[in-house]
Amino acid sequence: MLKTTDLGYWYQDKQQPLFEGINLEFEAGQSYAIIGHSGTGKTTFLSLIAGLDRPKAGEISLDGKSLSKIGLTTYRRHDVSIVFQAYNLFTYMSPLNNLMTAMAITAAEHAGDRDYAQKILEDLGIGADLINRNVQRLSGGQQQRVAIARTMACDANLVVADEPTGNLDEDNTKEVIAQFQRIAHDQHKCVIIVTHEPNVADQCDHQYRLENKQFTAVS
Amino acid sequence: MNFIKRAWLNVWAKKGRSVLLILVSSAILMFVLAGLLIRSAAVKATNQAKADVGATVTLSANRQAAFKKMQSSSSSSKSSRPKLSLTPVKLSDASKIAKLSNVKSTNVTSSTAVNASSYDVVSTSSSLGGNSGGPGGMKSSTSSGDTQIDGVTATSLATDFSSKQSKITKGRGITAADKNTNHVVIEKELASQNDLTVGDTVTVKESSGDKAKVKMTIVGIYKASSTSSSSAGPMSTDPSNTMYTSYTLANTFKGSKYAGTADSVTFNVRNPAKVGSLKTAGKKLINTSKYSLSTDDSSYQTVKASMNSVEGFANKIVWLVAIAGTIILALIVILMIRERRFEIGVLLSLGEARWKIIAQFFTEMLMVIVVAVAIAGAGGKFVGDQLGSQLVAQSTTTQTTSTSASGQPGGGGQPGGNGTRGGGPGNTGSTSKQATKKTDLDISVSAVNLAELGGFGLAITFLSIMIASGGILRLEPKKVLIS
């Protein structure tokens, strides 16, 4: 589904790349964890596969089509859905409006379907008493579930998450990871999670460690 | 069109910020509206001034040509003392000019002096009489009459009455219908001294020719303002001894050879801006070696200058406030956008087009501006009223001062000689008063003003957003969301 070919990235000095020559493949219906120490370039790698930045070397392709040909804006709108550590919800909206807005922008199949959005939220434990409350008045766990619900409401087949459990307690972490697994297995989407937490990584189907500018599969 | 919904949700959710933006925008637009109102009121007042104040073209004897003729005759014949001979204006010539398209009305003036017969004239210490024309604005008689007769077409067209220096207090003024009658309008002081009222008769004796007695019927009594009286100096009769009659009766007093003539004929111009073209057209219809056409649009020019000054200032207000407002709003929007970087980042990560994000901010500001226009519409009249009256007071004072400084002596007296007025009216006192009265600004908010204000509001919003949106166009979602 998603493939990186000779992928490389550096900031100022080409001689000191964060990573280089990365060749990976990510399949639909699977969940992947990207692990590694701080500063190794995990989040930078995620920003590339999320279409938030362009690689300095190599290319990323989706279903055989290069992202540069698809266009990053189009790619972000239709093909990828991102979950952030800081949730990054629209703070002036309710959970329901957050979903409705994301569905409208991405022109999702169920765009405008309030009942559909409400059902997704309810499935993730955001009940009728919370769906019209301002998201800033929800707990961290609830806000992260809204963020996950937003990815589920959109039709993107690729879900990338940057430290999605970084701000959550143990119970919420388990719940969130379980949700990602359901997205991968039940909705047949490809889920890629960047994390530094081994217990989160252990829940995923595959693990890649970024170390010494290279990715290595962890068995 | 999801950006419109987002804009509404944002404006509604952040009520405090929206109210503050509305207040700032209202203040800016209120001053823009005040400027627009003053400007439109100044334009309206200038147009009104054209109609009210007007301008005149006067046909009279060509004094300059007559003076040159007198000088040449004095050099050729040294035996007799040369005389300034002025040719009275022929009414047939005047009627040709009256037919020109821009002439609104015509006033024929023929003045002379007679002697009181059945009444006593009002005497003042300064009322010495005289044999020559006095300085501008003063009434004097060249014949030895103690009563000044001002023959007119209608008193309402006479300068003293049109400038409100004199006004009818009883009965009526002289009108065109009084032509060939012995109707007269006398001054209030003269009437009370002689116990005369409307319907009574007065008898005067001609001061030249067969010195016949003529009985006149009083149809009206007027009051001359104290200004006229106080302006009269030596060599003038008391203003109370001035009587208004039809110009035909004044000509009768002057003698049969003056029938069908006048000292001067004043044409009131419909459009003061075209007074020059009327003068040019009129000159083609007269013998310019004998007659001259002079223009007087000083009242119009005074009002026009005053209103131009107000209009110019109002224009500056509009543009300065609009520019300042754009800068202020742009700064606010820039700050607003900076604090919403994460929101923009999320929108970009969802694949929202940058122009739609800019459109969202524009829509938010548009919602604010619509409310601000309504508030400014309500408050702009108040600000405009205050600012307008202050401006007019300042502007009129400036204009009056400059006019007074330049027009002290009434120059270039038109008729002169032949028992008539010595100098033409000085254009200081009455003109300035008229201008002051006419330059009140009628400030009212019309639909056009609101539409203009809406246009300015829209332009200010658009420019502010365009200036501020540079940040959105440069924003990289990775830097906002990942770092």
Image: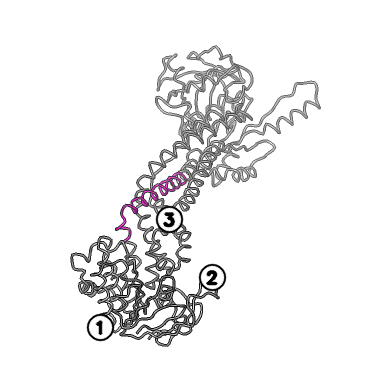
Q: Residues within 10 Å of mark 1 (few under 14, many from 20)?
A: few
Task: Identify the subunit bearing mark 2.
Answer: A
Q: Relative to the observer, which residue lies in front, B375 or A70?
A: A70
In this rendering, the label closer to the viewer, 3 or 2: 2
- What residue type is disc 1 on? Asp
Quadrant into which the C terminus of chain B falls = bottom left
**Alpha-carbon span between mark 1 and mark 2:** 42 Å
Q: Can you say whether A68 is above or below B92 in the image?
A: below
In this rendering, position of residue B70 left or right of residue B463? right
**Circle 3 is placed at which residue position?**
B335
**Alpha-carbon span between mark 3 and mark 2:** 30 Å
Q: Quadrant of residue A103?
A: bottom left
Question: Which residues lie in the magenta part?
Answer: B10-39
Q: Relative to the observer, which residue lies in front, B174 or B199?
A: B174
Q: Residues within 10 Å of mark 3 (few under 14, many from 20)?
A: few
Q: Earlier in the sequence, mark 1 or mark 2?
A: 2
- Residue B212 position, x and y percent, is 55, 19
- Residue A45 position, x and y percent, is 43, 76
- Residue A81 position, x and y percent, is 34, 76
Kindly report the secondary structure that dominates the magenta region of the rendered protein: helix
In this rendering, the label closer to the viewer, 3 or 1: 1
Task: Identify the subunit bearing mark 3.
Answer: B
